[in-house]
Amino acid sequence: MEAVLKAIAEPNRRHILELIAEDELTAGQIAQHFDVTRPAISQHLTVLRLAGLVTERRQGTRRLYRRRRQGFAETKLFLESFWDDRLRRLRQEAERRSSGSGVITERVSVQRELLVLAPPHAVWELLTDGEMMTHWMGQSAACDPTPGGSYRIEVVPGQVVAGEYVDIDPQRRLAFTWGWEGNAGHLVPPGSTIVVFDLLPVAQGTLVRLTHQDLPAIGSAGSHSRGWEHYLERLAAVAAGGTPGPDPWATDPERLMTELRP
């Protein structure tokens, strides 16, 4: 996070990030927008790449650069911890006035809570071990629960969610970016949202609090909320020593679409 804050403190680097937010550009194409030398632009790109904010892709002899959305996730979580209700309302009012339409286009978050009759360390294993995860969610899962590590889960046949871990406090807090690959990701692509699991020890076991941030619309928030409710119930059953059985959504696509329809 410190590297990210230092990288975006420089105005030219912020402008570069704006230029390559959606399109891949070469260093030369980027340099056309600045009154600085090409080597200076290359140096800025190096700083941004080392901070995890930019990807570099080779195409023949060219190097193409693009903003890496996941690189901002940890910093976003940190800054939002200072964002109280009054500041949130102020931001909403500013967005409403600037849009001129009176419509607030703020992204949506959902939260689910569930009491799990198992200690936090047992729940943590089910959240971070790929093989254990498939007992409650997913047909297959590959997880590297380290800061910057990636995960990839085939939730139901043909539907894959992927992201990177951005905050890891063992047995207490787990945060990662979330999005869908392929056609399913046209609204929620990889890196576009953040999922946070907070594990709170209580007398009966663990209170699992899940927050899914930055969903783009009420419809996607509703379907993701119902999806998390479905899988958290399966998580609770496994953690308590039970067997939830085969996932009905994996074997009945029609039921899946009916129950998750926005």
Image (tube, grey):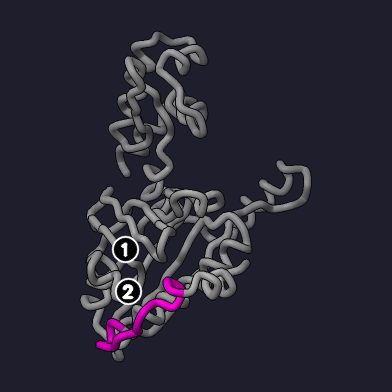
Q: In the displayed orientation, state which residue is furthest to the right.
A: 101
Q: Mark 1 = which residue?
A: 174
In the image, residue 247 lies in the stretch drawn in magenta: yes
Mark 1 Cα-neighbour bin, 10 Å: few <14, some 14–19, many ≥20: many
Q: Position of residue 23 (x, y in %)?
A: 50, 29
Q: Position of residue 20 (x, y in %)?
A: 48, 29
The answer to whether residue 87 is visible is no
Which residue: 62% across, 63% down? 219
Q: Earlier in the sequence, mark 1 or mark 2?
A: 1
Kind of residue sitting beneath label 1 = Leu
Placement of the C terminus among the 4 image quadrants: bottom right
Which residue: 36% across, 56% down? 176
**Residue stretch rendered in magenta on the structure:** 238-251
Which residue: 57% across, 61% down? 220
**Residue 212 vs residue 152, the one in the foreground:** 152
Find out whether the residues at labels 1 and 2 contact each other: C-beta distance under 8 Å.
Answer: yes
Q: CA distance from mark 1 to mark 2?
A: 9 Å
**Residue 91 vs residue 240, the one in the foreground:** 240
